[in-house]
Amino acid sequence: MTAVNLGLPLRAAAPGAAPAATAAAAVAPPSTEGRPEHLGLLDRFGRVARDLRVSVTEKCSLRCTYCMPAEGLPAIPRDDLLSATEIARLVGIGVRDLGVREVRFTGGEPLMRVDLAEIIGLSAAAAPGIDLSITTNGIGLDHRIRSLVDAGLTRVNVSLDTVDREHFARLTRRDRLPAVLAGIHAAHDAGMTPLKLNAVMMRDTLQDAPALLQWALENGCRLRFIEQMPLDAERSWLRENMVPAEELLAVLSERFTLVEAGRDDPHAPAEEWRVEGWTIDGAPATVGIIASVTRSFCAACDRTRITAEGTVRSCLFGDDETDLRGLLRGGADDAEIARWWRAAMWGKQAGHGMEREGFAPPIRSMGAIGG
């Protein structure tokens, strides 16, 4: 019998500490030795995190092969998940005290939280005027988009890797493409424009990429392709099997004329190419590529992450996590929680390290971390 890592580690409050899920919070935050006085989420390499990603669940309605095992991730006990009130409190601290400028709710699949509208509404109240978005697979979005927008949702990203129904079913292990497309159309009709689509570049769907870009252009969506990273729960990722950005560009260029446009924001992960002859909402149409593996942008990373269980994860590829849930439930005030959060980010690693010999992927898979 072969053991399969399902993507959920023993969650430590700090390196070497007891698992956060079974032990009280550590008595002191991670070391801040050498850290200058700075109110924001500064790390040792001079980067400041301003983009907050909050995972709200490990559950998902799909089983994408690059993310989850067929049986899904182990369920997180309900009491271990942050509540809507706790999430909103952290959003408020992040924006008010730590310089966070945008917040994205992820999963798993955030629509699996029945209280997602409450999470968004309380967060909007805790941080008035902040940009609040979700990354979703779109299933069920047509039934909930109005309540989410009314609560304060400002943007939507939908994950869509192919518009070939058979290929979609094989990749996600679910025949739900029509439901995803319905969610995209509903979000567009609700004013969530420009709506962004995220597609993971997979060998099995590479030839579908031009059709996906064509669909996005015809439906007023901004498409971004993402190089597959070693974040799958089944540990099957191999560098030699991934589709690099250059290969994808060659395939897209067989149908479209692409002109490199670079990045508008140096912190943005996507490099953009103009699609000649196309416009979206009156502006030149572009396609983006997030080349996380072959064109690392770690040096400009400005993200901080909160897991569904309330730990700070400073880097997508770092297994160090700092427990804030224990502080939230233990009576700590906002200033103390902010101090721990700053300490967690001070220890952020330089980069993912995929170029180093002996690189090992993180214990958690993407579905357990949040995008």
Image (spheres, rainbow, N blue to C red):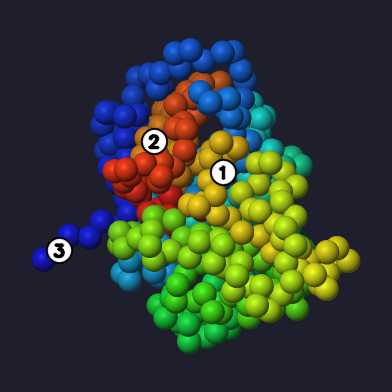
Q: Left or right? Give the position of 42 relative to 126.
A: left
- Look at the numbered disc 1 and give the secondary structure of its residue: loop
Q: Residue, x 44% and y 42% (percent of image)? A: 352
Q: Residues within 10 Å of mark 2 (few under 14, many from 20)?
A: many
Residue 13 visible within the image: yes
Residue highlighted by disc 1: 297
- Closer mark to the observer between disc 2 and disc 1: 1
Q: Is residue 262 above or below residue 208?
A: above
Q: Name the amino acid, label 1.
A: Phe
Q: Which mark is residue 321?
A: 2
Name the one closer to the observer, 80 or 107.
Answer: 107
Residue highlighted by disc 3: 2
* Residue 61, quarter of the rendered image: bottom left
Name the one closer to the observer, 146 or 282.
Answer: 282
* Residue 25, quarter of the rendered image: top left
Q: Name the amino acid, label 3.
A: Thr
Distance between the alpha carbons at the discs numbered 1 and 3: 36 Å
Distance between the alpha carbons at the discs numbered 2 and 1: 22 Å
Q: Is residue 329 above or below residue 88?
A: above
Q: Name the amino acid, label 2.
A: Glu
Residue 360 percent across, percent down from the top left: 31, 46
- Closer mark to the observer between disc 1 and disc 3: 1
Q: Left or right? Give the position of 282 relative to 287.
A: right
Q: Is residue 274 above or below residue 343?
A: below
Q: Residue, x 66% and y 66% (percent of image)? A: 223
